[in-house]
Image (tube, helix red, strand yellow):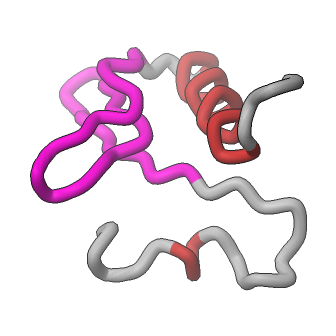
Amino acid sequence: MAGVSKGAFGEVIAARFLREKGFVIVSSNYRCRQGEVDIIATQGNYIVFVEVKTRESFSYGTPAEAVGPQKR
């Protein structure tokens, strides 16, 4: 995707994956006083808040390691 940042590309792929699994995307890049959520989605009775981390390698750690307590 020319002209799109790596992070935005990862969010597009994540949203596509969630839709394929039956989730409905409610919002993308939702901002509030506390910060930002990449994707908010629903499925049945569940509301899911998704933080997307796009990596080309594990040189800087795993994506899970990049989500600290403040993001959680």
In the visual, does 69 lie left or right of 18?
left
Does residue 29 sit above or below 49 in this rendering? above
In the visual, does 24 lie left or right of 54?
left
Nearest the eye: 20 or 64? 64
Residue 43 picture quarter: top left
Instruction: Look at 65% across and 46% down and name the residue there.
Output: 7
Does residue 52 sit above or below 25 in this rendering? below
Q: Quadrant of the N terminus?
A: top right
Whole-percent x, y for residue 63 in the image: 64, 69
Whole-percent x, y for residue 52 in the image: 55, 50
Residue 5 picture quarter: top right
In the image, is residue 66 part of the stretch drawn in magenta? no
Instruction: Look at 42% across and 46% down and name the residue there.
Output: 50
**The residue stretch that appears in magenta:** 24-52
Nearest the eye: 8 or 12? 8
Residue 2 picture quarter: top right
Whole-percent x, y for residue 3 in the image: 80, 26
Q: Main secondary structure of the magenta part?
A: strand
Q: Quadrant of the C terminus?
A: bottom left
Instruction: Kindly give the residue lying farthest to the left in the view shown.
Output: 33
Does residue 19 sit above or below 6 in this rendering? above
Nearest the eye: 46 or 9? 9
In the image, is residue 33 part of the stretch drawn in magenta? yes
